Amino acid sequence: MGAHAESNKRIWIVLGILSLITAVEVGLGIVKPPALHLNGLGTSWLNWIFIILTLAKAYYIAWAFMHLEGEKKWFRRSLVWTAVFLISYLLFIVLFEGGYLYETLAPLVKW
């Protein structure tokens, strides 16, 4: 198998995986199962599923298209763990401080 055929196969695999994750996201966005609207850790479980699937897609895009798979292990880890820490910190701030802001302004603002 030549390099061109191997490259085509890789592109189709990446397309398939990203399409599958996107289809799950769109399907959940259309159906919006009532069981997933229960609150958990600052927001609904449906929102957590969207956040996790979006992060998985972002990681796979970086892995495939930014060629992280061919980098040294320490470099990959430094990029991934820094991003995981910063995104987790941002989610914590947005979800918990956003709830506080809503509770504080609720008597003053018509939502």
Image (cartoon, rainbow, N blue to C red):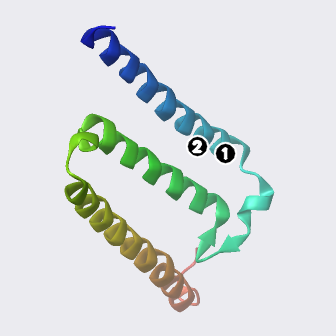
Rounded to the nearest angstrom, the CA distance separating label 1 from label 2 is 5 Å
Q: Is residue 93 left or right of residue 110?
A: left
Residue 80 in picture, x, y percent from top left: 31, 59
Q: Is residue 94 left or right of residue 74?
A: right
Under circle 2, the secondary element is: helix
Question: On the image, which quarter does residue 74 sit in?
Answer: bottom left
Residue 98 vs 32, above or below: the answer is below
Question: On the image, which quarter does residue 42 sit in?
Answer: bottom right
Residue at 56% from the left image edge and 88% from the top image edge = 103
Instruction: Using the image as rendered, state which of residue 105 and residue 64 is in the foreground.
Output: 64
Residue 16 in picture, x, y percent from top left: 50, 26
Residue at 60% from the left image edge and 77% from the top image edge = 41
Residue 28's tag is 1
What number of labels is visible?
2
Residue 90 vs 35, above or below: the answer is below
Question: Looking at the figure, which quarter contains the N terminus?
Answer: top left
Question: Looking at the figure, which quarter contains the C terminus?
Answer: bottom right
Instruction: Using the image as rendered, state which of residue 70 and residue 61 is in the foreground.
Output: 70
Residue at 65% from the left image edge and 58% from the top image edge = 46
Residue 110 vs 15, above or below: the answer is below
Q: Is residue 105 left or right of residue 68?
A: right
Mark 1 residue type: Leu
Residue 99 vs 69, above or below: the answer is below
Q: Are marks 1 and 2 in contact (CB under 8 Å)?
A: yes
Q: Residue furthest front?
A: 1
Residue 84 in picture, x, y percent from top left: 36, 65
Q: Which residue is mark 2?
A: 25
Mark 2 residue type: Glu
- Characterize the local packing of mark 1: few (<14), some (14-19) or many (20 or more) Cα atoms within 10 angstroms: some
